[in-house]
Amino acid sequence: MPTPQLILTSFTLAEFKNIVSECVQAEIQRTASPAVSDSEDEALITIEQAIALFNVSRMTILKWRRKGLIPYYRMARRVYFKKSELLTAMKGNVKQFKKFANGKKENGSV
């Protein structure tokens, strides 16, 4: 393992503030973007996009989320989903998803 080198450089206070500001802004932009991956399937999507993807109501998505059928991610006060995880979950639990999409309760009654 190579030994790290220590390089000392002097900066003015203004230069140091500028460097720190640029680093902070770059990190904020990187983490604030919902699409954190280059792959379309790995991109985070909003609840509105999930509704359009499955052609179901907002309440259905919320029921699936509460029941643990779909994984989700929180960023601040917003909820996001990974498209690939939604599609995988849907393929693995088609009967469960249909039951909740049709408005049936667990025992099968409406």
Image (cartoon, grey):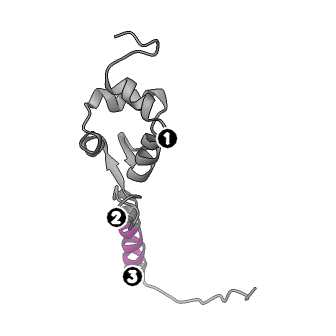
Image disc number at residue 92: 1
- Where is mark 3, residue-wise? 15
Mark 2 secondary-structure assignment = helix
* Amino acid on which the number 1 mark rests in the picture: Gly
Horizontal and vertical percent for residue 18?
36, 77
Query: Disc 3 vs disc 2: Cβ atoms closer than 8 Å?
Result: no
The magenta stretch spans which residues?
A: 17-26
The residue lying toward the viewer, choosing from 20 and 56, is: 56
Q: Say which residue appears at 38% left-offset and 68% top-offset.
A: 38
Q: Distance between the residues labelled 1 and 3?
A: 55 Å
Screen quadrant of the C terminus: top left
Q: How far apart are marks 1 and 2 (CA)?
A: 35 Å
Left or right placement of residue 66 versus residue 2 in this view: left
Horizontal and vertical percent for residue 16?
43, 78
Q: Say which residue appears at 36% left-offset and 29% top-offset.
A: 62
Q: Which of marks 1 and 2 is nearer the N terminus?
A: 2
Is label 1 or label 2 in front?
1
Is label 1 or label 3 in front?
1
**Residue 53, quarter of picture:** top left
Residue neighbourhood size for the residue with mark 1, other residues' Cα within 10 Å, grouped as few (<14), some (14–19), many (≥20): few
Q: How far apart are marks 3 and 2 (CA)?
A: 21 Å
Q: Say which residue appears at 44% left-offset and 43% top-offset.
A: 91
Q: Is residue 46 above or below residue 65?
A: below
Query: Is residue 34 in view?
Result: yes
Is label 3 or label 2 in front?
2
Horizontal and vertical percent for residue 100?
37, 24
